[in-house]
Image (cartoon, rainbow, N blue to C red):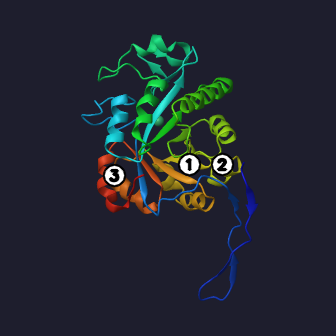
């Protein structure tokens, strides 16, 4: 699926000195196209949970609905595989002290969210997400399980659930993960989907060579490596940054030219973006 070919080196004339310098030769990849016209998308981190509508409940169906209703480009959620091979939406690897990977969905789901909601299953979550008519992309974070076989099963089961809800579509869902194995599995099984690596420790060109087509790095990484934004873009990769809540950081990241900002304060990012907000 992945096409790879090399472009000839561009020759850049150095202004004023008359000497020529060869630009780096980069491979070209057939990654999902970025068609944002220089605009920046907003991703509501764990849904738009810091709102009345979102019930101050991360990863709830209410927070997903709030993100959809406010028209943010993306709404992020975190998923784990339970001991009975079901998928639960939750950020931490434990719920009220119970290790998710060692318990069944039924054992975990009764531990209610702050707004009184049952912990969502992926199925319940997708039932809501699929009603949004494609206006908000569901950004699914696969959590590491410390077991590659279980991680691959989680990816396969997620893809099955997305297909069952008519959401296995690059315009409706994107994937992120700290797990290198998980990103490589997604690259192999779903190369046409946005697939961003989160851990911040690998340069974009190395990821691209593995077929991983995007980066979603913590803001501090881009202070250390601002050049990674341009490098990723030259490789055709998407660039996301997390979790940007501070006004000065929001402006810095907009100026840096990232494609998406993941945030707990999406309305503030919207205010800073103005007409430069990318919406579907
Ligand atoms: Mg997350």
Residue 76, numbered circle: none
- Is 152 located above or below residue 225 in the figure? above
Instruction: Give the Cα separation between the discs numbered 1 and 2.
Output: 8 Å
Residue that mark 2 sits on: 207
Residue 92 image position (x, y, % from top left): 46, 26
CB contact under 8 Å: marks 1 and 2: yes
Residue that mark 3 sits on: 269
The front one of 48 and 33 is 33
Query: How many marks on residues?
Result: 3
CB contact under 8 Å: marks 3 and 1: no
Instruction: Give the Cα separation between the discs numbered 2 and 3.
Output: 28 Å
Q: Earlier in the sequence, mark 2 or mark 3?
A: 2
Residue that mark 1 sits on: 215
Q: Residue at x 41, y 35 (%)?
A: 131
The front one of 5 and 19 is 5
* Residue 184 in which image quadrant: top right
Left or right: where does residue 5 sit relative to residue 205?
A: right
* Disc 2 residue: CB within 8 Å of ligand 1: no
Crowdedness of circle 3 by 10 Å Cα count: few (<14), some, many (20+)? many
Residue 75 image position (x, y, % from top left): 42, 40
* Residue 108 in which image quadrant: top left
Q: Earlier in the sequence, mark 3 or mark 1?
A: 1
Instruction: Give the Cα separation between the discs numbered 3 and 1.
Output: 20 Å
Q: Earlier in the sequence, mark 1 or mark 2?
A: 2
């Amino acid at each position: 699926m992945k096409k790879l070919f090399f472009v000839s080196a561009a020759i850049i004339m150095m202004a004023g000195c008359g000497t020529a310098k060869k630009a780096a030769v980069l491979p070209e990849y057939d990654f999902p196209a970025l068609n944002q016209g220089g605009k920046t998308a907003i991703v509501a981190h764990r849904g738009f949970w810091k709102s009345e509508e979102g019930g101050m409940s991360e990863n709830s169906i209410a927070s997903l609905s709030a993100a959809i209703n406010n028209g943010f480009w993306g709404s992020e959620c975190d998923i784990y595989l339970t001991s009975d091979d079901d998928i639960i939406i939750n950020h931490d690897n434990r719920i009220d002290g119970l290790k998710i990977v060692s318990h069944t969905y039924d054992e975990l789901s009764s531990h209610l969210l702050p707004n009184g909601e049952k912990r969502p299953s992926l199925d319940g979550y997708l039932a809501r997400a699929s009603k949004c008519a494609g206006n908000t992309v569901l950004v699914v974070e696969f959590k590491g399980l410390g077991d590659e076989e279980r991680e691959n099963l989680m990816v396969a089961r997620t893809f099955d659930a997305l297909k069952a809800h008519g959401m296995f579509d690059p315009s409706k869902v994107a994937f992120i993960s700290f797990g290198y194995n998980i990103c490589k599995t997604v690259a192999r099984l779903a190369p046409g989907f946005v697939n961003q690596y989160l851990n911040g420790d690998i340069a974009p060109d190395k990821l691209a060579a593995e077929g991983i087509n995007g980066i979603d790095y913590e803001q501090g990484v881009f202070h250390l490596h601002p050049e990674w934004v341009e490098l990723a873009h030259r490789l055709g990769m998407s660039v996301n940054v997390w979790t940007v809540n501070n006004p000065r950081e929001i402006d810095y990241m907009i100026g840096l030219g990232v494609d998406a900002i993941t945030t707990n304060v999406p309305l503030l990012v919207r205010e800073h973006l103005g007409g430069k907000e990318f919406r579907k």
